[in-house]
Amino acid sequence: MVSISLHNVGLDYPLYGAYDYSLKRRLLGHLIRDPGEMRIIRAVDNVTIEAETGARIGLAGPNGSGKSTLLRLIAGVYPPSSGSIAVRGNVVPLLGLNAGVNLDFVAEDNIALLLRISGRKPTRAMIEEIWAFTELEARMQRVPLRMFSSGMLMRVLFATATAFPADILLLDEWLSVVDENFAEKAQERLLNLVSQAAIVIIASHDQPLLRRTCTRIINLDHGRIASTVTVTSPAAHALELREKRA
Ligand SMILES: Nc1ncnc2c1ncn2[C@@H]1O[C@H](COP(=O)(O)OP(=O)(O)OP(=O)(O)O)[C@@H](O)[C@H]1O
C-alpha cells in the first residue's frame, strides 16, 4: 500500500550568516536586548496532508509559499522541524538541478551514486541505457558535472531519475532548461512514469496544468494550507510540459 501522511508538519530554515555579527552590533545587542530578531524562516507551517494510491496532488501558491520545501520534506531531503511524516513506497523526486549530485565527480559516477541513493545497485548496462537517453557525446561521461551546461546537467539528472518506475513521483517545475527536442522525449518518458506511479505530487504556478492533471489542488500561502480544491474531472495524465515553459 503506497501512502503519504503528513501531520502538522513544520520546517524552519536556519538563517546562518544573514545577520550583522559585528562587535558593535553584538555589544549593542546585549545592551538593547533585541528579542524580536528572527533567526529562522518558517517555510512550512502546520501542514497536514493524507494521500493514498491514485492521488494526483497539485501544490500551488505564490513565490516563497513553501511548495518546493514541502516536496523536499516528502522526499526526505530535510527532516521536519515539527510534526510527523510517514511515507510508504519508493519516492522519485524530480526536484531540480542540485539534488544529490557532486559536481566534482564525473557524470557516470554521479549516475551510479544517484542509483545507489535510490536503492539500486548500478550496473554498466543501466548506466549505458541512461546515457543513451541523454543523447550526449560518449566522452562526456568521463567529464565532471561542473563542466556541463545547465541543459546538459538536466538531461543527465532527468534520465537517471526517470530510469525506473516510482511509487511516488514528486515534480517541481524544473524542465524549463532543456531544449525542444529533449523536452518531447522527456515528456513521453515522464507521462509513462506518471501513469505508473501510485501517487503524483506536482508543484506548479500553472493552474490550468494542475487542473488538467490533478485530483486535488492544495493552495499554499506563507507555508500554510490556505485552501484545498477538489478537481472533479482531471484529464487523465494530460501533462503538457511544454505549456509550463511559456
Ligand atoms: N535553503 C534555504 N534557506 C533558507 N530559506 C529558504 C531556503 N529555501 C527556501 N527558503 C525560504 O523558504 C520559503 C519557502 O520557499 P520555497 O522555495 O519552498 O517556496 P516555493 O513556493 O517553492 O517558491 P517558488 O514558487 O518561488 O519556487 C521562502 O521564504 C524562502 O525564502
Image (tube, grey):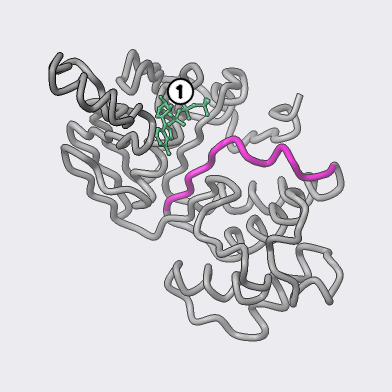
* Residues shaded magenta: 168-179
Residue bearing the label numbered 1:
64
Q: Is residue 220 above or below residue 145?
A: above
Judge from the rendering whether residue 194 lies leftward or rightward of residue 240; answer left or right. left
Mark 1 surroundings: few (<14), some (14-19) or many (≥20) residues within 10 A:
few
Q: Quadrant of residue 5?
A: top left
User: What is the x, y in percent for residue 196?
Assistant: 53, 53
Q: Quadrant of residue 73?
A: top left
**Considering depth in this image, is 29 or 60 the residue closer to the camera?**
29
User: What is the x, y in percent for residue 169?
Assistant: 48, 48
Q: Residue at x 56, y 47 (%)?
A: 194
Q: Residue at x 37, y 36 (%)?
A: 17
Judge from the rendering whether residue 80 lies leftward or rightward of residue 178; answer left or right. left
- SS of the residue under disc 1: loop
The amino acid pointed to by label 1 is Gly
Quadrant where the N terminus lies?
Answer: bottom left
Cβ of mark 1 under 8 A from ligand 1 = yes
Does the stretch in magenta take in 169? Answer: yes
Q: Is residue 66 above or below residue 14?
A: above
